[in-house]
Amino acid sequence: MTQDTEKTTHFGFETVPEMEKAGRVQGVFNSVASRYDVMNDVMSMGIHRVWKDAMMDWLAPRPGQRLLDVAGGTGDVSFRFLKRAGYGHATVLDLTEPMLVEGRKRAEAETLTDQLSWVVGDAMALPFDDNSFDVYTISFGIRNVTRPQDALGEAFRVLRPGGRLMILEFSQIPNPAMQWAYDRYSFNVIPEMGRMIANDRDSYQYLVESIRKFPDQETFLSMIKAAGFAQAKYRNLTMGVACLHSAWKI
């Protein structure tokens, strides 16, 4: 057995070989693709829309910019980016093709066809040249990557000098009592919502567990800096339920 095959990572609370995680994540999102947008609204009571708007406010897209939206799924962030920019181009990359298929069905996709590309690909091995994009975003996706540090390195590589990194991800609430209450909601309510709405409890159990395994705000900030980014900062959203990390390739 080689050293690579002996490496392990987490899939929710389960320890699995690194080589298995991507396939398992694909299985999760293949299963929920058709109900993904509906479940986002139900799980967050619509707050994910506020978080994504806050992301665009901080990002302040400019006309003509080229966006790479990794783990972009159904295109939610890319659509927002293009509308804010006025014109530009967004490449939506996702490991799971059914998510991209659902994105192409959305009304926004029909009106923005010339400004959108849909690509199946891996965040840890992006199929793009160095210095290709002005902006790199990943929303609620980097915690599903087998090696997030490798994904950050790829983000740095494909951004042009002066390019912007923006990551929206679930995080940790600094207040222990509020974190306890949030945990009770997450573990007891969200998987049941998944069962009732998407007919898939297990996938949403994984999603809840994956949030708890992701690094906290400061630890993830240090990972972004380690990838070479400068001016790295973060802002908590909804008391830390979600967090925006921003940085630049200088």
Image (spheres, rainbow, N blue to C red):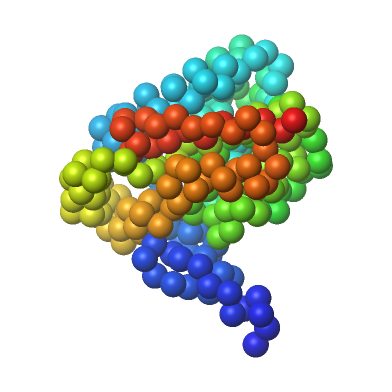
Residue displayed at 54% across by 42% down: 221
Q: Does residue 188 lie above or below 117 as drawn?
A: below
Q: Is residue 80 left or right of residue 133?
A: left
Q: Position of residue 49 (x, y in %)?
A: 38, 27
Q: Quadrant of residue 160?
A: top right
- Residue 238 visible? The answer is yes
Q: Is residue 200 left or right of residue 52?
A: left
- Name the one closer to the observer, 200 or 184: 184
Q: Is residue 166 left or right of residue 31?
A: right
Q: Position of residue 64 (x, y in %)?
A: 71, 16
Q: Position of residue 72 (x, y in %)?
A: 54, 39
Residue displayed at 48% across by 36% down: 168
User: Which corner quadrant holds the C terminus?
Assistant: top right
- Name the one closer to the observer, 98 or 193: 193
Q: Does residue 216 lie above or below 162 as drawn?
A: below
Residue displayed at 35% across by 36% down: 240
Q: Quadrant of residue 45?
A: top left
Q: Position of residue 142 (x, y in %)?
A: 52, 48
Q: Does residue 6 lie above or below 202 as drawn?
A: below
- Name the one closer to the observer, 4 or 94: 4
Number of marks drawn: 0
Q: Is residue 48 left or right of residue 19?
A: left
- Residue 38 visible? The answer is no
Residue displayed at 31% across by 41% down: 173
User: Which corner quadrant holds the N terminus?
Assistant: bottom right
